[in-house]
Amino acid sequence: MAGMNIKETAIKTNESLTDPFFSLMIPVEAVFSLPTGIGLFQLKGGGFVYGNLDAKTHLGNFDRAYKKQNDWILANADLENKNGLGYGYRFGLSYLVEINPQVSLTLEGNYLSGQSEWAWKGTVEGVNTNGDFVSEAFSEANAQLDYSGYEISIGLVFQSANPKKKGKRRRRR
């Protein structure tokens, strides 16, 4: 994921405060299907849990935001972030068109809203406008990674090529 925002933080910026990272998401959803002439229209809703792999703070963007917010000439942060499991809800629409009995083409759109722990701790050093060297402790235990947005996807759905066949009945003698 790239460009994720941090909520519940005093640092205000339009730049992403996270480096790019990967997430593993497990959705659980209810699906209401409506057959149409050439495909299947689906309404979906449910929840999800996710975990981030090696998610870190984008220190360059953090430094620029901290410097601007505190009116410093220079800022350099050394931060650690706690990255917990996240959860949220999702809902959306999809449309499936059968290409053959085993493969369908799908176009899908979802809205996701979730968050996970992103507790920051560390120090920020720099030079203020008076030319003085400054070192400050930085800690935000309630910061959260904002996992909200729209997802649009196109893909293929594969179904089993060998549906369960009924076996021959054996007669007992």
Image: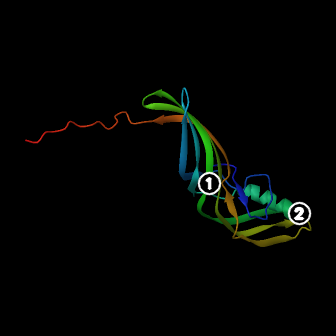
Q: Amino acid at mark 1?
A: Tyr
**Label number found at residue 71:** 2
Q: Nearer the viewer, residue 7 or 61?
A: 7
As drawn, which residue projects farthest toward the left?
173
Q: Nearer the viewer, residue 25 or 89?
A: 89
Q: Amino acid at mark 2?
A: Asp
Q: Position of residue 56 (x, y in %)?
A: 64, 58
Quadrant in the picture for residue 72: bottom right
Quadrant in the picture for residue 109: top right
**Residue for badge 1:** 89
Q: Position of residue 79 (x, y in %)?
A: 69, 65
Residue depicted at x 61% and y 40%: 93
Q: Position of residue 169 (x, y in %)?
A: 19, 38
Q: Secondary structure at mark 1?
A: strand
Q: Position of residue 155 (x, y in %)?
A: 54, 35
Q: Is residue 172 above or below residue 104?
A: below
